[in-house]
Image (cartoon, rainbow, N blue to C red):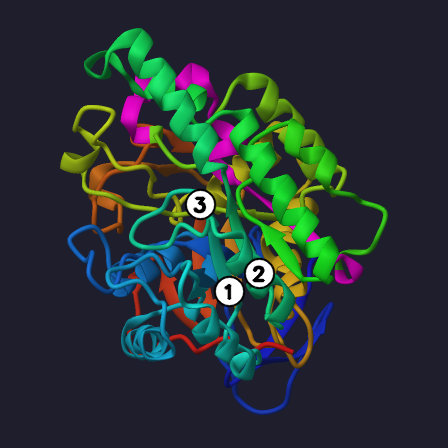
Amino acid sequence: MPGDVLIEEERIVRTGPQLNPPGSFEEINAEGLYLLPGVIDDQVHFREPGLTHKACIYSEARAAVAGGVTSFMEMPNTRPPALTQALLEEKYDIGAATSLANYSFFMGVSNDNAEEVIKTNAKKRSVCGVKVFMGSSTGNMLVDNLLTLEKIFSETELLIATHCENEQIIRNNLQRITAEKGEERLTAADHPLIRDEAACFESSFLAVQLAKKFDTRLHILHITTAEELQLFGNMLPLADKRITAEVCVHHLHFTSDDYAALGNRIKCNPAIKAPRHREKLWEALLDDRLDVIATDHAPHTAEEKQQPYPSAPAGLPLVQHGLLLMLEYVKKGSIPLEKVVEKMCHAPAVCFKIRDRGYIREGYYADLVLADLGGSTSVTPENLYYKCKWSPFEGHDFPAAIHTTFVNGYPVYGKNGFDESKKGKRLAFL
């Protein structure tokens, strides 16, 4: 419905059908547009430090706000990985100096840094969570030692976010398929057969068992299979759930049928799988077994992705187009706009207990997006803000557009491009 929002400095101070505040003020006429809370993306890889030929916090945060993302939570598998408190805080320093969006960074876990991870308990009001790779990852971050896992799950007071794939199943599948075909004949279409349903389910099942054993706050990232969905429920309000799950935009959109055209461009971990899984993911999203929509933005250079399948890295850039993709599904009638806002804005704030963000509410930070559902956005290399300068959506026309993005009450992106005079803030947690 039509309405007004009054912003003073960084926060929303009043909302109503027609506000007439005293004194002088700047008015933005947004007639015909939709005002949404800014998207909170709970899983991105911005590659800094150490991998900045692919991306950096500055470049990817610009892409984020251009896509309506006002806050992000970034993963620890950089180089060096964020496995110490000092390295974690270095990333916060970079964010403070360069990010247009609000930011938080996960503490990383390896098989041998459990004591360092537990120190993060003292920062639970200023760090989004602890990230556990229960499957192969970049750097020394595969955690497959059960004693380490039990220590982390039993002693960590922060939310634990997990990447769940069983490494032994993956290795067995790879060995078998390579023996059958020969390594030189492997292609991206083999990816969901190597990183298959069993690898995902077994690892997610273990994570859920550990969380139930120790009453840990667990958030399982990028669910991809129908089989995993039996691990999650919708009987409790989100705020009361101890175990939650995320789905990513590319797993809601692509299927294994798309490898023929896109190949390594959609190679990611966990793999994009057969169409039956996508159908079940949509069902679980709409009935609230899946709680959050994210991007898992994971850029690599075009040259890296053009290598033969075994050498090409996994991951694709998505943070600029995640909201636009979901708005396309709104236009198709697949999901209500209110549900997109719930899963991309409200739910991340609730899951991570983010202070004063994720809603259009009086007293909250004015992280807002004006979206034009009557507009369009053509994806070309020239209008990509990713440092890697490619997208799996190149040539696609989204039937919506991001008109203006506000971070902490300030219009950082709009029709005139970016205003970089103000930076985002470090997220705070309840």
* Image quadrant assignment for residue 116: bottom left
Q: Which mark is residue 130?
A: 1
**Is residue 418 visible in this depiction of the protein?**
yes
**Is residue 409 visible in this depiction of the protein?**
no
Instruction: State whether residue 326 is above or below residue 371.
Output: above
Residue labelled with disc 3: 401
Residue labelled with disc 2: 160
Identify the image quadrant of the N terminus.
bottom right
Instruction: State whether residue 146 is above or below residue 89.
Output: above
Residue at image x 73%, y 62%?
Answer: 215
Q: Which mark is residue 3?
A: none
Q: Which residues are magenta?
A: 239-265
Give the residue type that dot 1 points to: Val
**Place of residue 294 in the rendered image (x, y in percent of width and height, measured from the top left):** 52, 48
Residue 165 in the figure: left or right of residue 319:
right
Q: How far is the residue under mark 2 from the one under mark 3?
A: 34 Å
Q: Nearer the viewer, residue 258 or 134?
A: 134
Q: Nearer the viewer, residue 230 or 167?
A: 167
Q: How far is the residue under mark 2 from the one under mark 1?
A: 5 Å
Residue 51 in the figure: left or right of residue 5:
left
Circle 2/circle 1 CB separation < 8 Å: yes
Residue at image x 27%, y 57%?
Answer: 47
* Image quadrant assignment for residue 91: bottom left
**Place of residue 57 in the rendered image (x, y in percent of width and height, measured from the top left):** 29, 64
